[in-house]
Image (cartoon, coloured by chain):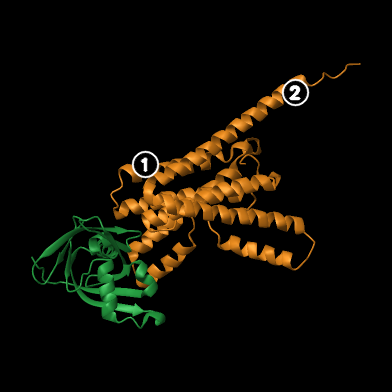
Amino acid sequence: MLRRYSRRRTLKENIKLAMLTAFTAGVVNVASLILFFSFTSNITGHYAILADEISNGNYFQILIVFVWILSFFAGSYFSGFFILKTSKKHRHIIHLLPLTIELTLLLLVGIYGDFFYQESLIETEVLVSMVLISMGLQNGLTATITNLSIKTSHLTGLTTDFAIHLAYLATGKKEYKGEVIGKIKLQSFIILSFMLGGIISGIYTHHLNFKVFYLISIIFFIVLISDYIYRLLKKRNKINGSKNLPRPIRK
Amino acid sequence: MLVYELYMGNLQAYFVSPEKRIVGQWKERYWNYNLSEENKFIAQNELHNLLSKKFYRHKSEVWDIKDDQTLDFLYEDGHRITAKWKLVGRGHILKIIHRNGIAEYFQIEKLNKRRMVLYVENDIHAKGKIKITFRKNAKKIQ
């Protein structure tokens, strides 16, 4: 799901990655709304809020929202920079660092919220910033490794693309039809996974509170471990396979 | 140096956390109900009664918001009710937790040295907005 980079990725791999990341973004977004009264998987709303706070002259809130936007930006920037900077030789592990940081941040938010959170304003701002960094990391990672074809933490652009692709099919044009159907499939899975994550989060965050962040961390941990085991097995099979190959006949 | 200090002092004043700005005694001034068109048939008193059943009614009170995160509702007859308060979100939601554990949420529309405007955060939103306007008490009631 995570190993292949850019154009070498198949539709199936992209769908798997998109479902995972959209689901987690949905869970995190609704959990943040319930726990912090703030969206954290997208920042379109934060730009609108920033403009509103500027017009009202609320300097403290301007600073907070600006830091939030910057947090998401920093996460995306780091993911993009790290992936693009990684040499081709190590492309199969490019996802490791951003996902590990994301997992750690979400786990820290869960632990802090579960044991230490006093609901003070400064704590809320820091925790929201951490969640925004992790969502930025995730979005930057998926966007970069899929050659900008997947962005799963917000659905504005995706809904537009989805509508355009459906409109294309409605015109009856046959050129690129297969590719368009593939994109529609991918986008539908993203929307459904995001929704599913949101619904599950909406139901369980009221009972689990910050423990919901453990759930996301566990999911990411399982994905990382299974990806590692898969790669290990593939490598072993490759070695075993090369051992069994018939020796070239010398003349 | 003096200019720098004045500038920094002003800057700090601008960046006062709403958690500090909200501390003080606030006298309720008005309750406004901006009813949507389809609900205009509900008389304002009726709506007020409906609201008082749904959550605590604070009319004609002074809200004494203290920096230790406690809040006293001071009534005209002299009795007071204590609750806890917190600011959530980016400091735009006031959460009041009553002794029985019931939490009320108010969206802070305006908060400055003299005036505070709150909107009631409730599912009654569907029926329109409920606005409470406060004026800060210059003279503190003990």
How far is the residue under mark 1 from the one under mark 2? 47 Å
> What color is chain B drawn in?
green
Query: On screen, A235 above or below A102?
Result: above
Picture quarter containing residue A2? top right
Observer able to see residue A71: no
Label of residue B87 in the image: none
For label 1, count other residues whose C-alpha is less than 10 Å away and answer few (under 14), some (14-19) or many (20+): some
Q: Chain of mark 1?
A: A
Task: Residue under label 1, please give it.
Answer: A111
Q: Dot 2 lies on which element?
A: helix
Which corner quadrant of the image does residue B46 belong to?
Answer: bottom left
Q: Residue furthest top?
A: A251
- Compared to residue A119, the image places residue A65 above or below, namely below
The quarter of the picture where residue A121 lies is bottom left
Residue drawn at (71%, 27%), measured in percent from left and top?
A238
The residue labelled by disc 2 is A242
- Can the viewer see residue B33 in this picture? yes
**Along the line of sight, which residue is nearer the eye, B36 or A214?**
B36
Image location of residue B72, percent across then percent down: 16, 62
A162 or A245: nearer the eye?
A: A162
Q: Residue drawn at (59%, 44%), measured in percent from left and top? A: A83
Chain name for mark 2: A
Please state the horizontal and vertical placement of residue B20, each as a whole percent of the image. Answer: 23, 60
Residue at point 43%, 52% (across, down): A203
